[in-house]
Image (cartoon, rainbow, N blue to C red):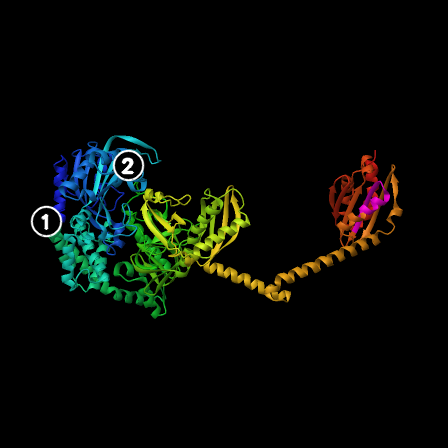
Amino acid sequence: MEYHGVNELRRMFLDFFESKDHLKMKSFSLVPHNDNSLLIINSGMAPLKPYFTGQEIPPRNRVTTCQKCIRTGDIENIGHDGRHGTFFEMLGNFSFGDYFKPQAIAWAWEFLTKVVELDPERLYPSVYLEDDEAYDIWKNEIGVPEERIYRFGKEDNFWEHGAGPCGPCSEIYYDRGEKYGTGPEDVMGGEGDRFMEVWNVVFSQFNNDGKGNYTELEHKNIDTGMGLERLAVICQDVYSLFDVDTNRAMMDLIGEMCGTTYETDDVKDISFRIIADHVKSCTFMASDGILPSNEGRGYVFRRLLRRAARHGRMLGMPEKFMSKLAQKAIDLSCDGYPELKEKEAMITRVIEQEEERFNQTLNKGLEILEEIEKQMEAERKTVLSGEDAFRLYDTYGFPIDLTKEIMEDKGWTVDEDGFQKAMKVQKDTARGARKTSNYMGRSDIYQQLDASLTTEFVGYDQLESDASATALVINRGNEDDPDDEIVEVLTDGDRGVMITDVTPFYATMGGQEGDTGVIEKDGAEFIVEKTVHLQGGKVAHHGKVVRGMFQTGDRVSLKVDREARSLTARNHSATHLLHAALMEVLGSHVEQAGSLVEAKRCRFDFTHFQAVTAEELKKVEDIVNQKIAEEIPVVTEVLPIEEARKTGAVAQFGEKYGAEVRVVEMGEFSREFCGGTHVKNTGDIQAFHILSESGVAAGVRRIEAQTSKGLFEYYAGLESELHRAAQLLKTAPADVTEKIESLQNEIRELNSENQKLKSEIANASLGSAEDEISEIKGVKFIATAVENVEMNELRNLGDQLRQKIGEGVVVIASKSGDKVNLMATATDGAIAQGAHAGNLIKGIAALVGGGGGGRPNMAQAGGKNPAGIPEALKKAAEVLESQIK
């Protein structure tokens, strides 16, 4: 592979496709033409949308361009890594109803391998999962081995934006080699720096009606996009887009002007990258007539220039430096954009004037504030209005916390709510130039964020990291009605969300609860209460600002709660051991059906069709603790999913996996797909105990357990209760069981004696009830009342009287305080004649204020009216008489 400069690569690409009968068109303006869905052109195909939608007839059915682009959503990311730039150039070849997949793929391969001379063995195509046609072309016509062709899902390899033309795409990745990364993310399709996507060809073959219904397009199209800077990174074998020849020349000039060198100080390097990128963006915007203002595209220009100016001061640059850098950018890019040279004087003057104006306004900031203070004193006000605070922030670069500090020195305050409202008005005004269309339709507040904003998770190996706050969301409501709003600032007391470009915080996933901790910056503090995933690879840190202020773009320090993470990791690793132990004890049918892993405990749901016995649970627990004692190393590895499956790794229930998966191994005992955090060695878990086993659904059982600190606290609680029980029993903890058994024996003896006394009392209360025997239609009948006899003894008395009368019916009522107990019993002979104890009780219970019933031979009832006992007993004779045949 030969070295090729940026300008050379641009010419090579355009000349190649011109040789394939493509019309070579110059770059369109950065100002969209008749497209309210865009603020600034941000992709190669954006200016060509009318050709794709059929609104305009293309000048030729084959077109090639190198389009200048600016993506405003990347502004806050610029400088903090080597991937993002507000300005970039997009190479493209387009077909409007002419050639399709075979030619597009063949020409992409020819350009990369024959013209640029990239090593074919290092190129890895990807296709949409269901696009067999593209797969076959790569395999059979191009000859790429099938192990280097990857199938990805809709999120990665299907292009669509709401209603309209859409279709699968095929990307080409280049393996830059191990020197650019050997981590788990440095795999094909991963987020690392080793495999770089260099080419993406979109096959527009369907029309989406906006409701998910797809129909074949009569005229299919090709839309190819390839970042020129990305291609240069590969061809020049450099680390990032800031290292390619044209950008490196900008870095060298910046270094000369500030007396330092790029790549000698990480903090200063950020400023180098921000200045180089932003000045180039302003240069190209000015060439297209975009001038600094406080709204729309002009505000993008002003924001970029002021950001570059601030970083220039940080580097110690001369007071006026940007026009000289703009001249350098023009010289480096005029080969592809001759209009830059033609408009050089205008471009440099616009930039010079805006820089000078910003320096003046920044220096005048204190003067303006002093004037505001005088006016407030005259009007006897002690609260600075939100509008004035925002004007100082937006126009003169004054952070809100600095304004607050100045006001506090005078004993005054700032209307921070008004400040936030003014900021929202400004943001809405900036957005006003871009009207909503089917390309921009969003429903969720977080979907309003640029899709390019992502969060890199670094928390497997570190619990602290620096990052940029890429987005802030304030929460003025509650969970049911959050009233969320994207803001530029979160201040003391605000509840909300912070999104960063990098995070060590694990976001809730796979049953593992997200991390908690703190985000700090220059005395400001944001307490992270929970961490969750958002769409598009973003991680949201939910919490509250307890001190200071945070702004979008701030460099912040993120610190995970180490103890909580460690305890959670122990519980998570324990569930892996538990799963393997359950399969060993209960059988291979056991599968995970859900889990919850947090610092205090773990919960594991699994498929099993009956309750787990105490003996089985003991075996499971013993196995887990044995594996903990063996101190098995816990090893993680990222593998292609098919290769991972061949290792026997167990997939988690309900999880969605990509082409690459993370496998967690604990020796030969446990091997699972898992993206969670784990201990380094099973010995770190310390101990494991099952708290409970229960059923949660048909065929699904649940085990709750604890490990390490949570378990030790559980044991400490039990020990405390044991000592308390011993004190109450007046014995030693070791003798508690013996003491309890002694007391139980004593209680049994006392209960027996008590029961004997109750019987004697009941018999005594019965007196000579047998003397009250009467006959009703030939059936002997006794109805009597006793005092303070409970229902059990009442039944015993009824049995005794029934035995004495031989055959007949007995009714007894007992008064006990304000309550009444009624009992009736009938012999078999009486029942044969029609007697029914249950119906008899029903007939008299209401008279004592109660109800009841029962069988023909025995019934009982309760009541609350002792005064009704005489009438109830009298009524019993009448009811029995009506029963006897």
| Marker count (numbered) | 2
Nearest the eye: 513 or 208: 513
Q: Is residue 726 visible?
A: yes
Three-letter code for the amino acid on which mark 2 is drawn: Cys
Q: Residue at the spot x=77%, y=51% of the render?
A: 793
| Image location (x, y in percent) of residue 482 | 42, 51
Q: Secondary structure at mark 2?
A: strand
Magenta segment, which residues? Answer: 798-814
Nearest the eye: 832 or 358: 832
Numbered tag placed on residue 342 in the rendering: 1
The image shows residue 745, relative to residue 616, as above or below, that is below
| Gap in angstroms between the C-alphas marked 2 and 1 | 39 Å
Q: Secondary structure at mark 1?
A: helix
Closest to the camera, between mark 2 and mark 1, is 2
The image shows residue 536, relative to residue 406, as above or below, that is above
| Image location (x, y in percent) of residue 283 | 16, 52
Q: Is residue 729 left or right of residue 709?
A: right
The image shows residue 803, relative to residue 355, as above or below, that is above
**Quadrant assignment, res 67:** top left
Figure quadrant of the C terminus: top right
Of pointers 2 and 1, the one earlier in the residue sequence: 2
**Quadrant assignment, res 655:** top left
